[in-house]
Amino acid sequence: MTDKTIESTDGSRAIFLDAFVNNVLVGSLILVILGLPSSLMRWSDTGFMPLYAVHIFTSLATILMYVFKRLISLNMKGSIITFTLMLVGLVSMLTFGLSGIGTLFAAVCGYFSNLLWGAKIAIRISVIYIFLLCLIAFFYINSIFTPSLDLNVYVSSINSWLINIVCVIVVTFLLIGPTSEFIKQHEKLILEISNKNSEIEHLANHDKLTGLPSLRLADDRLEHAIAIADRNSSKSALLYLDLDGFKIINDSYGHDAGDIILKTISQRFQSAIRRTDTCCRIGGDEFLLIIPDVLDINSLKRMCAELNELVCQPIEYGDKKLSVAVSIGVAIYPDNADDAKSLRNCADQAMYDVKKTGKSNYKFYCSDPNRLNRTPSVSQSSVG
């Protein structure tokens, strides 16, 4: 993964977490607006209990945090929310025993902490919370603590039911909303990474200027063409093309003119080949054409002649018309070589022999088996 991708990933995560914490803050504010009046109304039914003081404290903290949320850091907001959730849950269990909602808040604290700080911190917070719950359970089991009120009065109070139902509804939506958003962000991030990887792979395997496959991909395509020839007991051909006169234009008119020449010639090459053929730019003004399943030699000769004619057509550059030609070396598998590297060397040698004998032509490679050093000779075909 590139540095830019990592930065994009970190940025997307920070944006998501900030939105997530703000959503939790809004949900907490809703709980305050609906829950605080209910707690105060329950006061008249049950008398004062420490839980109500906690409700008032956490409500004020939530309201202040919402008002000044832009001034408070993400970690600080997360820490305050986690602390208030733990405080409300534990005091609820301390006041009502198993009738409290502390176990629900334990799950919410673990989920919230995991998204915000990761699994390690979430586990630590959950362990602390569970330890305190176990401590409360120990006190109740050993009758050190007893419920602070008559639970019959508590469970028959409409305000008690109202606050619990509202709490469950809000907490449920707090879990569903951020989870859905997290899944969307995760899928978006995967798509971005996939697109970046595809872009990197394309740049690694294609020429940036012309969009043609590069030498790296050309080697793979050539191996594939050889495999097709072996499987079908047919022939595959490799054409090595080098532009004549390109350096003069590039030096005389500049790189912009050279780029236009290369892009135009690339388009002309592609227009002259089949869908199953591959045109590659392997560097500078050199190209490869990979032709699997060659029908016959005459079809290759016609293709070479057509390529020469297409390349020689003038190319407009401003108010000027520029012209180049092409030298083509042709090697055939399995007639000239038995592997990709040797085949490319044969086509390269044939192309250089064209350069030595006048350029703007094409030649088929052939070897002389009587020469010990295997110096190639080349069968020439004229254009025209």
Image: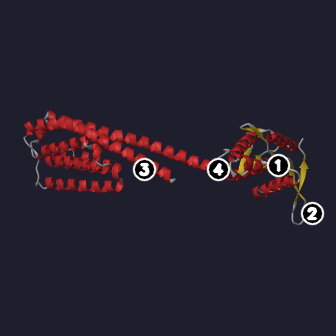
Q: Is residue 261 visible?
A: yes
Q: Residue at x 49, y 53 (%)?
A: 3
Real-space CA distance between mark 4 and mark 2, rounded to the nearest whole angstrom: 40 Å
The correct choice, above or below, for 15 with respect to 166 in the image is below
Residue tagged 3: 10
Q: Nearer the viewer, residue 285 or 349?
A: 285
Please state if 57 lies on the left or on the right of 350 as rendered.
left
Please state if 194 lies on the left or on the right of 286 as rendered.
left
Q: Residues within 10 Å of mark 4 (few under 14, many from 20)?
A: some
Q: Earlier in the sequence, mark 4 or mark 3?
A: 3
Identify the secondary structure beneath mark 1: strand
Real-space CA distance between mark 3 and mark 1, rounded to the nearest whole angstrom: 52 Å
Real-space CA distance between mark 4 and mark 3, rounded to the nearest whole angstrom: 28 Å
Q: Earlier in the sequence, mark 2 or mark 3?
A: 3
Which dot, 1 or 4, sits closer to the camera?
A: 1
Real-space CA distance between mark 2 and mark 3, rounded to the nearest whole angstrom: 67 Å
Residue tagged 2: 370
Q: Circles 2 and 3: CB distance less than 8 Å?
A: no
Q: Circles 1 and 4: CB distance less than 8 Å?
A: no
